[in-house]
Amino acid sequence: MIEIAPGVVHHPGWLDRATQEALVTALRETAKAAPFFTPRMPRTGKPFSVRMTNCGALGWVSDEKGYRYQPTHPETGAPWPAMPDILLRAWAELAGYPHPAEACLVNFYEASAKMGLHQDRDEADFDAPVLSLSLGDTGVFRVGGTTRGGKTVSVKLQSGDALSFGGPARLAFHGIDRVIAGSSTLLPSGGRINLTMRRVTKPE
Ligand code: MD3
Ligand code: FE
């Protein structure tokens, strides 16, 4: 593992190929129960280029009304499906936090998708880290400090990589500049999947 910035730990190749394939199979079931939706920016309604779904007790959604966590899918109204076991195990092994994750956001990037620099601050508990797993094509990830406009570092996130953000990095600005098409054979039609596991509520 490599600490790329204070509180940002990169675990290249944390999931082996067989586990990545098993996780993709599990996520196909997740997407049957909770289809990918296109989130929209608060107020303007401008669509994101990334499509999303969730698993776990709570899911992150965004629309004209704002960003929030909710227990149901925004289009079907159904509860989110359970987190696959591989994700529960990844959290237990890497998060270093004594309570389970409550939400896993599943982001799908086609070759032209990106995510601008932002902070994740819709959770009530910033003591817990955020844990990310990457699958499929490589993403060029950028992370800075806790104020906009500071210096940033770039890291390529490859299929199977884990990245955890805790302590001083929990409120760091971060985003995905681009996806490198054709860089992985994991997803037959290409693209990148990123999973972010989070604790949302403060434990008692
Ligand atoms: C740093 N996702 O869903 S994962 C997001 O690759 C998000 O899809 C990106 O940013 C992606 O919000 C980056 C790495 C990541 C996730 C959460 C963080 C970095 C973070 C939360 C706080 C600080
Ligand atoms: Fe984020």
Image: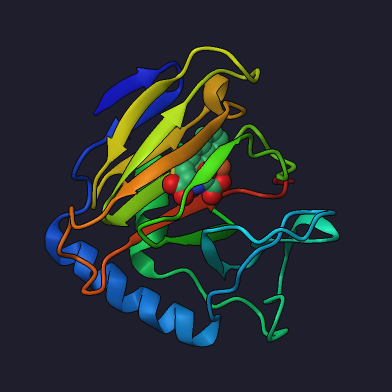
Q: Is residue 99 visible?
A: no
Residue visible at 13% across and 60% down in the picture: 17
Q: Position of residue 132 (x, y in %)?
A: 42, 46
Q: How is the image coloured?
A: rainbow
Task: Decide if residue 185 is on the left or right side of residue 175.
Answer: left
| On screen, residue 148 above or below 68 | above
Q: Position of residue 146 (x, y in %)?
A: 62, 19
Q: Is residue 62 visible?
A: yes
Residue visible at 37% across and 80% down in the picture: 28
- Quadrant of res 72: bottom right
Q: Nearer the viewer, residue 61 or 113?
A: 113
| On screen, residue 87 above or below 91 | below
| On screen, residue 17 above or below 114 | below
**Quadrant where the N terminus is found in the figure:** top left
Residue visible at 43% across and 30% down in the picture: 142
Q: Position of residue 73 (x, y in %)?
A: 67, 77
Q: Nearer the viewer, residue 45 or 92?
A: 45
